[in-house]
Image (spheres, rainbow, N blue to C red):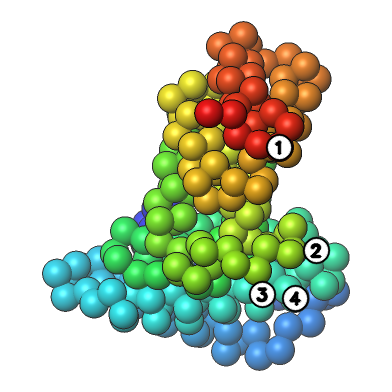
């Protein structure tokens, strides 16, 4: 689900464009050209999988920009038409491309389709094992995000993908009920977005009461909440 698998990717690509063509309310420019371009991108990834020693990080980054831009445009089109029900189909394509890029030393500078992809897939998962695997995949992708995005210098938009990716990963980690997974995700949030840590842990404690999380999960959230009480980290 998270890693690039050529047969599964091809099947998901077929399913996506069948759904797009069947949706009369969606009008996307040059749909045939977009489909051909994504199939070409898939073929590049397949060839690269066969010859991993010949991969150049700059080329991997270029592939990422190319394919994720196409996914981004498709997402914009289906969302503009009010067809968010098609987001999961796109998710099954954008996520494995992003993890492939991360595993092969490339950089990701277009996060929107990746973040939407992980969020969509998270809604389908419930087992601790699958949620833990998602946390690992999200962490791998975060490591490959362009340094300029990770610097988070323009943090005026609360919906910016870097922020959403970090917060969503912490939510997924909490759903695993695994203290070690939670600790790792929370620590990265502290380092990446310290300005958002107080609010996240405050809301996290509220959810502990609403949802009724087990005591060992509550204990981890409580500890981080207390460290950031009053909006300032307590040393």
Q: Which residue is mark 3?
A: 74
Could you give the CA–CA distance between mark 4 and mark 3, rounded to whole angstroms?
5 Å
**Residue 35: in sight, yes or no?**
yes
Q: Secondary structure at mark 2?
A: loop
Q: Position of residue 227 (x, y in %)?
A: 60, 27
Q: Secondary structure at mark 3?
A: helix
Q: Which residue is mark 1?
A: 231
Q: Quadrant of residue 47?
A: bottom left
Q: Quadrant of residue 14?
A: bottom right
Q: Are marks 4 and 3 in contact (CB under 8 Å)?
A: yes
Q: Are marks 4 and 1 in contact (CB under 8 Å)?
A: no
Q: Quadrant of residue 158?
A: bottom right
Q: How many marks?
A: 4
Which residue: 45% across, 68% down?
147
Q: Which badge, 3 or 1, is on the more N-terminal residue?
A: 3
Question: Which of labels 4 and 1 is toward the front?
Answer: 1
In this view of the protein, which residue sits in the foreground, 188 or 100? 188
Residue 79 has which mark? none
Q: Which residue is mark 4?
A: 77
Q: Which badge, 4 or 1, is on the more N-terminal residue?
A: 4
Few, some or many residues within 10 Å of mark 3 (<14, 14–19, 20+):
many
Could you give the CA–CA distance between mark 3 and mark 1, rounded to whole angstroms?
39 Å
Question: Which of labels 1 and 2 is toward the front?
Answer: 1
Q: Is residue 10 found left or right of 114 in the rendered image? A: left
Q: Position of residue 63 (x, y in %)?
A: 40, 78
């Amino acid at each position: 689900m998270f890693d690039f698998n050529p047969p599964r990717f091809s099947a998901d690509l077929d399913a996506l464009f069948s759904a797009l063509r069947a949706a009369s309310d969606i009008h996307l420019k040059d749909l045939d050209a977009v489909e051909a371009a994504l199939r070409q991108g898939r073929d590049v990834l397949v060839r690269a999988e066969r010859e991993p020693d010949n991969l150049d990080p700059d080329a991997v980054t270029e592939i990422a920009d190319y394919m994720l831009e196409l996914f981004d445009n498709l997402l914009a089109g289906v969302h503009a038409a009010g067809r968010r029900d098609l987001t999961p189909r796109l998710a099954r394509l954008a996520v494995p491309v992003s993890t492939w890029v991360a595993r092969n030393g490339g950089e990701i500078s277009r996060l929107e389709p990746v973040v939407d992809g992980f969020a969509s897939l998270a809604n389908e998962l419930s087992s601790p094992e699958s949620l833990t695997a998602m946390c690992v995949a999200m962490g791998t992708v975060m490591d490959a995000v362009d340094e300029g995005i990770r610097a988070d210098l323009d943090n005026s938009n609360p919906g910016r993908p870097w922020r959403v990716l970090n917060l969503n990963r912490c939510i997924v980690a909490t759903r695993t009920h695994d203290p070690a997974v939670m600790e790792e995700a929370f620590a990265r949030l502290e380092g990446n977005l310290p300005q958002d840590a107080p609010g996240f842990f405050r809301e996290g404690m509220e959810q502990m009461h609403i949802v009724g999380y087990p005591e060992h999960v509550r204990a981890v959230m409580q500890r981080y909440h207390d460290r950031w009480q009053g909006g300032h980290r307590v040393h």
